[in-house]
Amino acid sequence: MTGTSDPPLTELLQRSAAGDGAARDEVWHQVHDRLRRLAQARLAKESAAQCQPTELVHEAYLKLADLELAPRDREHFYAIAANAMRQVLVEQARARNRAKRGGGQAAVTLNSRFADSAPPVVDVLDIDRAIQALERVDPRKAEAVVLSYFGGLTDDEVADMLSVSPATIKRDLRTARAWLATALDAGH
């Protein structure tokens, strides 16, 4: 039920945080399709998808509900959702690895924005470890990668979310891509 008279997502998030159950339900209706498209794009990059896009969205949304966070606005919500999707994918990869004792790991291909120098197929756990390492060196660049890659935000949206200029984000992502490629190469 989305239309031109529907309240903006930021307003719904604020009402939901205040305990409005109807607003919480409407948030779900407004974000579901975009989250599903983001999940579908991420899973399409895997050689053996761990789950279906709808399952990934639902698992991520359950994580969001468990956190009981109050996103400030639309961008903050999608940033939190991006991290939740990343966590779900990492948890699934770890569970699969435990079950198979390290064999048959599903591979994830980074999109071309992050994989110019990296091997064409990279395990989601390797990506997570590389992002964690980048986070220790430069938290903003790591967050920009997560927002862009897992959250599907545009450079302008990432810049707005991180309160920097789009040119800075473009530089950050270029540097992060090179850094991650080196880290991923070193891990193989």
Image (tube, rainbow, N blue to C red):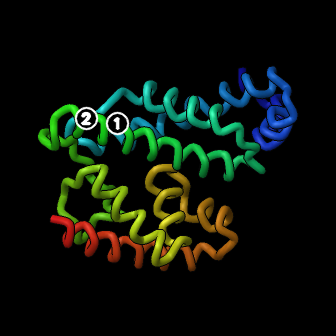
Disc number for residue 92: 1
- Disc 2, disc 1: CB below 8 Å? yes
Disc 1 residue type (three-letter) = Gln
Q: Position of residue 45 (x, y in %)?
A: 29, 45
Mark 2, other Cα within 10 Å: few <14 / some 14–19 / many ≥20: some
Closer-to-camera residue (5/7):
7
Query: What kind of element bears circle 2?
Result: helix
Residue at 48% across, 42% down: 85
Q: How many marks?
A: 2
Closer-to-camera residue (182/94):
94
Closer-to-camera residue (154/184):
184
Q: CA distance from mark 2 to mark 1?
A: 6 Å
Q: Give the image quarter of residue 105.
A: top left
Disc number for residue 29: none
Quadrant position of the C terminus in the picture: bottom left
Image vertical order of residue 39 relative to residue 112, above or below: above
Disc 2 residue type (three-letter) = Arg
Q: Position of residue 29 (x, y in %)?
A: 66, 25
Disc number for residue 96: 2
Q: Give the image quarter of residue 81.
A: top right
Query: What kind of element bears circle 1?
Result: helix
Residue at 34% across, 65% down: 130
Residue at 44% across, 46% down: 86
Q: Is 170 positioned to the left or the right of 80 in the image?
A: left
Q: Position of residue 12 (x, y in %)?
A: 81, 35
Image vertical order of residue 40 relative to residue 167, above or below: above
